[in-house]
Amino acid sequence: MDSNPALCAAIANHITTNPQQRITFAQFMDLVLYHPEYGYYSSDALKIGFKGGDFFTSPNLCPDFGELLAEQFFQMWEILGKPIPFSLVEMGAGQGLLALHILKYYQHRYPDFFTALEYIIVEKSPTLRQEQQQRLQDFPVRWCNLEEIPSNAIAGCFFSNELVDAFPVHQFILEKGELREIYVTTNNNEKETNAPCPSFVEVTGEPSTPQLAEYLDLLGIDLTQSVYPDGYRSEINLAAGDWLSIVADRLQRGYVLTIDYGYPASRYYNPRRSQGTLQCYYQHRFHDNPYINIGRQDITAHVDFTALERWGQKCNLKNVGFIQQGLFLMALGLGDRIAALSYQKQPLSQLLQRRDALQQLIDPTGLGGFGILIQSKGLDNTEISQPLLGLTLPE
């Protein structure tokens, strides 16, 4: 398999220097994805897009995704009374394509808003930050860490697209009706002593933190019910709660818009989903083995949107609405864009390619089935009463 030997050695060192000779799966996933030198998101192994990549996102398809999102942000600015500056904080900006599409659209369509806009990118990966800075060099964009933004400093919108699914998750398993956490250790039974990479195996133990049980209690999930089979396993994304609490603290007034694939808690922890949602992406193929292609593949887990809603309420965020991406984009005018293709004079191949891209954005079995959660903070009753365009479905 195509693992990074240096990263495997670094992970093995973390394990062997741990008094218990093991690390949580969340620690393993964090090292695999975010190790400062060898992690997937820190290295040249990261490939996004169609050719030779591991996965693609909505902005890779066409500018329309960003342009329609831009329409929603523009309305948010109007609802808030057109504050100057209006801060758009994109968290996890990938290759910078979404930012490019949004900023270009504002520059030509809404020059007054473009002048009032402060665009901030929060990016953990040095590799991606460098690519973003090169792509966006003609626009006034500021890069910073989330922790560098002062409390109550932002009037505007924090938003992300496929960010939360890449947060490291704890994994658990039910053994004889008890919650046990899954840990990662080195394979001491390896016969191939000269193998270029150490390999890793799972062991189970007591939960590393009481927060795992508290998380399930918050969601009203009772794993002691007989409907949950022995060996049932799934994930808990504690990092998402930490992230959302920081975002809520930095937001003075405005919105938080989260786009990702996932489920409400009742579906996420359905007894029939007995092996969780963890997926690995390698060269546009997905599987469920995180212990191969280490450092060369993406690892994700679906997002529990109920947890984001409940955590948000504890952080003074109000739920504005939850909707599928396809419906959201249609409400913002994507259907009109598809209809307009019939009147455009372009080569047939280009028209078909564009139609296919727009259809993929709303395909309910793919990107169109992603969830969009919108939360708010600091809005008065008049502002709260104004419905957002993306949540307003035609009758």
Image (cartoon, grey):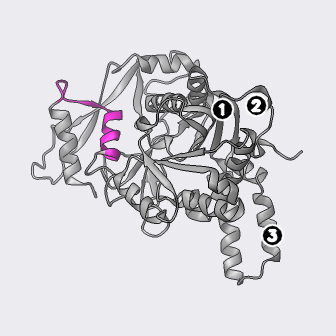
Q: Which mark is residue 340?
A: 3
Q: Position of residue 165 (x, y in %)?
A: 49, 42
Indicate the quadrant where residue 208 lies.
top left
Is the Cβ of the residue at disc 1 closer than 8 Å to that at disc 2? Answer: yes
Judged left or right of residue 300, residue 113 is right
Q: Disc 2 marks which amino acid? A: Ile
Indicate the quadrant where residue 254 lies.
top right
Q: Which mark is residue 384?
A: 2
Judged left or right of residue 91, residue 388 is right
Q: Disc 1 marks which amino acid? A: Ser
At 55% from the left edge and 18% from the top edge, which residue is drawn?
A: 218
Identify the image quadrant of the C terminus: top right
Residue 321 seen anywhere in this rendered image of the structure: yes
| Among the two numbered marks 3 and 2 on one chain, the one whose residue lies closer to the N terminus | 3
Q: Residues within 10 Å of mark 3 (few under 14, many from 20)?
A: few
Judged left or right of residue 97, residue 72 is right
